[in-house]
Amino acid sequence: MLKPVFCFILILTVFISCKQETEIVPEIYQPRNTHEAYEIALDQAGLLNAALGEDWKDAARNALKKPLKVELPFAEDFYVSSTEAKAGGYRFEVKRGHKIEVKVERDNKDEFEIFLDAFRIIDDSTDQYLHIASAGKNELYLEFEPRADGEYIVRFQTELLRGGIFNIQIQKVPALAFPVVGKDKSAIGSLFGAPRDGGRRKHHGVDIFAKRHTPIVAPTEGRIRFVGERGLGGKVVWMRDTKRNQTLYFAHLHDILIEDDVYVYPGDTLGTVGNTGNARTTPPHLHFGIYKDGPIDPYHFIANTRSRFKRQLAKDKFIGKTVRARKDSKLKVEGLVRRSKSIPIPKFQIMQTIGASAAYYKVRLPDDTIGYIAYDDIQLADRPLKRQIANGSENLLSDPAISAIPIEEIPQGEEIKVLGANAEYEFVERSNGSKGWMMSAGGG
């Protein structure tokens, strides 16, 4: 009888075990980039919803909502205060085929995190931005290749309570190397979409003209899928660009110097320029095409349109300093683009410099308006414009506004240095070195 009882208990145990529910363990959330990882760390430390944490989150959002418009290549020196939670956004246009390179340098060698992120603007009106790339932890370099024409934003932000003077450079370069040795975009003589055969078809590539026998090289790494003579292209090479999942087409070659199913790297020779196929009545040239779900304009993939960074006339000695307008001027408030909106700046207007780019300083007005002013339109607000005597007991204010907080009381008869102005307020310095705002003698 022992064996049947033992079997019954065993079966019952298995049955009960099968009836028990399996415990569900939630997957640990993995942050997608260093900015998101830092935000999670702030939340775990109980700081994300504190005042400073909220300021940091707001700054990150505002850098996307109100970025400064720039034209590439763009370089800027800028100041970040360690007592404020700030972020900067730079908005620019990009064509498919470009590669964007972002480089940051800093004067502060202390170890702290810097966050570089890139976004594509989906819809301005609804604040939709697609995150597409981020620099790695402790990296000050970011590059990405846009998959579509559009407008993009690069955002810069430091961790809390960290600052200094930084330099950022943003430029666009071709995603591919030029495929004809010794030539550049000036050798392109026929563009994508040009009519062919009396308009019956369109040109699905660009023609790069060069002397016969000029070497043709791989503009990126990939695998050769076909070499041989075929139709209108004459002697052709088909190559798979494995990095971008697209096909490259080289036609009208004089000589083919590569074989099928060979993996090649940038600069490897594929053949030489010729005029085989339907190009036999034209000067020697390479027809270069790109295909991915149909033909793609290859121009921006290979044409180096990069210009030099503009000469830096605005020096970093003013960055982070309080300055004033030395004459009536204008402030570009939408960034450094040709049609940027401008607002008038009166002589002696007080502002703080937070950056320098080419012939402009980036400044912040007392009302937090940010824009660019010509480098020779400002001066340090260190020497007094005039001196005046306090008529009665009044307060030194934190800001040029009715809601400003009184900093300290100024006794009657004290001499005050006037350093600048903002509307009906004057920026002043007391005899003890304290600086702040007072209602001007003619204001109120």
Image (tube, rainbow, N blue to C red):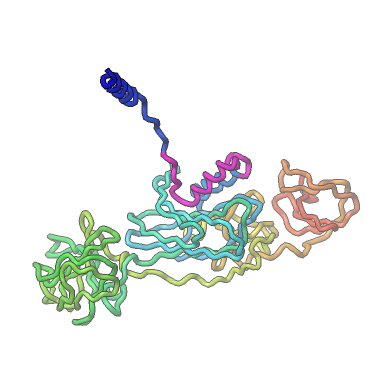
Number of marks present in the image shown: 0
- The answer to whether 20 is drawn above or below residue 350 in the figure is above
Position in image of residue 267 (x %, y %): 29, 74
Q: Residue furthest top?
A: 1
244 vs 93, left or right, is left
Nearer-the-camera pick, 44 or 170: 44
Residue displayed at 25% across by 70% down: 264
Q: Looking at the picture, does residue 50 appear above or below residue 380?
A: above
Going 42% across and 44% down the picture, which residue do you hit?
128
* Residue situated in front as seen by the camera: 109 or 378: 109
Task: Give the vertical position of 203 relative to 85 (above or below).
Answer: below
Residue in the foreground of this view, choosing between 36 and 150: 36
Is 155 colored magenta in this rendering? no
Verify whether residue 37 appears in magenta: yes
Q: Quadrant of the C terminus?
A: top right
Looking at the image, residue 306 sits to the left or right of residue 406; the answer is left
In this image, 174 relative to 438: left or right? left
**Whole-percent x and y of residue 380?**
70, 64
Image vertical order of residue 19 relative to residue 51, above or below: above
Quarter of the figure with residue 45: top right
Considering the image in quadrants, where does the N terminus appear? top left
Q: Which residues are magenta?
A: 27-52
On the image, the x and y values in percent for residue 23 come to 40, 31
Q: Quadrant of residue 280?
A: bottom left
Would residue 363 be seen by someone viewing this image from the given angle?
Answer: no
Q: Which residue: 66% across, 58% down?
A: 352
Residue 257, image x and y in percent? 17, 77
Is any part of residue 259 visible from this angle? yes
Residue situated furthest right in the rendering: 413
| Residue at (55% x, 71% y) in the render | 312
